[in-house]
Amino acid sequence: MSGATTQDDGEDEIVTVNFKVTESFLADIDDTWQGRGFNSRSEFIRYTLRDAVEFPTFDRDELIALLEAEDDIRTGQTMTADDAREEFGTSDE
């Protein structure tokens, strides 16, 4: 989890926001917040929204690159740092 705070810092007025979700999605939300040790659904939703605003997610291309790198690791298509330095002519200094 990020360092995003879910606590009221006393500077902003707290407002209530309502939104609609399906019952099955709400069940997923409840399983998630309870499984991750949050005190309430509201705390989890505030945390998740603040985290999404402060730390936007990867774009599609970045996600694809990460997945391809993970596949390379699983299939042994990687090289040591020393091999990479030698191949690409860089120094570890």
Image: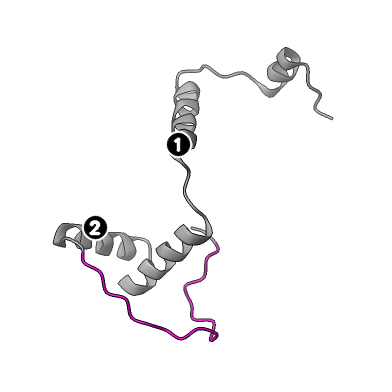
Part of the protein shown in magenta: 3-20
Q: Secondary structure at mark 2?
A: helix
Residue 34 x/y as whole percent: 31, 65
Residue 73 vs 41, above or below: the answer is above
Q: Residue at x 47, y 49 (%)?
A: 57
Q: Considering the image in quadrants, where does the C terminus appear? A: top right
Q: Residue at x 34, y 73 (%)?
A: 42
Q: Residue at x 69, y 23 (%)?
A: 81
Residue 72 x/y as whole percent: 49, 21
Task: Give me the disc on residue 39.
Answer: none
Along the horizontal axis of the image, is 15 left or right of 53? left
Q: Is residue 1 visible?
A: yes
Q: Farthest residue in the left direction?
A: 23
Residue 56 vs 74, above or below: the answer is below
- The residue under label 1 is 63
Residue 34 vs 7, above or below: the answer is above
Along the horizontal axis of the image, is 21 left or right of 92? left
Which amino acid type is shown beneath numbered disc 1? Leu
Q: Secondary structure at mark 1?
A: helix
